[in-house]
Image (cartoon, coloured by chain):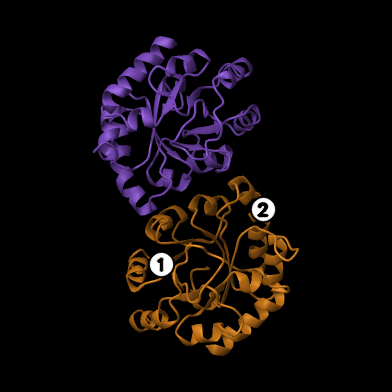
Chain colours: A orange, B purple
Amino acid sequence: MFRENLQNRLAVYLVMGLDAYEGRTALETAKAALEGGITMLQLREKKAPLSRVLKEARPIRELCREFGVPFIVNDRVDVALLLEADGVHVGQDDLPGSEARRLMGKDAIVGISAGTMEEVEWAVQNGADYLGVGAIYSTLTKGDAGEPIGTRLLGQIKQRWSRIPMVGIGGIGHGQAAPVVAAGADGVAVVSAIVHSRDPRLAAERLKLEVLGAR
Amino acid sequence: MFRENLQNRLAVYLVMGLDAYEGRTALETAKAALEGGITMLQLREKKAPLSRVLKEARPIRELCREFGVPFIVNDRVDVALLLEADGVHVGQDDLPGSEARRLMGKDAIVGISAGTMEEVEWAVQNGADYLGVGAIYSTLTKGDAGEPIGTRLLGQIKQRWSRIPMVGIGGIGHGQAAPVVAAGADGVAVVSAIVHSRDPRLAAERLKLEVLGAR
């Protein structure tokens, strides 16, 4: 049951689209990252035609199954259902978490993004299994991520809901994961630090060591 | 069974978002249009947060049920499932029709947009119950609708697949529905001609008379 023990599963959470980077296909990047020890993988593809998304995401989904790593789909619950994903991640403008769970079933992981305490409250009310909190640092990957909020909110959440699993997200590179965990997160969600890396396997390994070391 | 007798149900197909126009809420526009005799209604809302979409679309969905008119959701199959829609309408970049049907069940209506013969072929292969063909005329409503194609493709489709239900869509106003039907369409799908009208009930009535007169 992936919904259990989420704290540990959130250590190094790779968020990725389907574009190729550094001469690697998305599938090759996913494979290297899984070998490097990522603990969860989210498909966040906003532009590609959905027929392409289904086709190219299926082998990534299968790979996650082989590695025993939860495969999560961003925003589109319909795509998550078709890919037999282990869960969905929704933002504040996406389907409410409670509605996403109705479609996905009770065993699915439902993650919700939050950047303010109000958004955190809404996410908790909507039955979030974990929170994606950010943008922690400034990021070029997500145009609508807003101003960076730093790590302060993580501590405030921890104080109020000591048991809710959460990751920091947004511009987190090597050497920047430890303060996020020290502030209260269970781990880090990253795009660039792995996807744009020359060696995604090594990048995942290093991030994992940093997160585990900071716990 | 809404999937049956689709030709008649496609006579006047209202496509609408949730914005207010002419001092009316979307719900008020939908009610007037249903009273005026629209035969199908599609929710196409691309910008609003999905929590708002669910909340504001539910009464429109209920109204369609009362009038015995199929309620269709554009693009998002997850939203269609949550609203218990009678079907979905998908474009070429959305979920393939066959995948949409897997999620919606065999009784659901699946409509597919097409603007070229290649797209029509793809739509037919994907099990389209009806085609939305266009943009027939130039339109300001849909920014990505492409160059207007006129009514010629309608005739070509009719020649090749005489029995597939289809509507023309794109910039069709009063006095422009008859040539679309004469070219082979079962009806017209409209946004502005009803939504931006001062009297959506009358607009629907007039369009229906025009379509039925041209059959």
The percent coordinates of residue B189 (x first, y second) are 43, 27
Res B194 visible: yes
| SS class, disc 1 | loop
The percent coordinates of residue B145 (x first, y second) are 52, 36
Q: Nearer the viewer, residue A138 or A42?
A: A138
Q: At 44% across and 71% down in the image, what residue appears?
A: A147
| Outermost right residue | A23
Residue A171, quarter of picture: bottom right
Horizontal side of B9 relative to A192 (left or right) equals: left
Q: Do callouts 2 and 1 mark residues in contact (Cβ within 8 Å)?
A: no
Q: Nearer the viewer, residue B183 or B37?
A: B183
Q: At 67% across and 53% down in the image, what residue appears?
A: A56
Res B70 visible: no
- The chain letter for the residue carrying disc 2 is A
Rendered image: mark on residue A128: 1
Q: Earlier in the sequence, mark 2 or mark 1?
A: 2
Give the label, 2 or 1, closer to the camera: 2
| SS class, disc 2 | helix
Label 2 is placed on what type of residue?
Answer: Glu
Horizontal side of A181 relative to B13 (left or right) equals: right
Residue A35, quarter of picture: bottom right
- Give the answer, above or below, for where B59 lies relative to A117: above
- Give the answer, above or below, for where B15 lies relative to A1: above
Pointers 2 and 1 within a single chain: yes
Q: Nearer the viewer, residue A71 or A52?
A: A52
The percent coordinates of residue A134 (x first, y second) are 46, 73
- The chain letter for the residue carrying disc 1 is A
Real-space Cα distance between discs 2 and 1?
28 Å
Q: Which residue is mark 2?
A: A56
Q: At 67% across and 77% down in the image, what residue appears?
A: A203
Mark 2 is surrounded, within 10 Å at the Cα level, by few (under 14), some (14 to 19) or many (20 or more) other residues, namely: some
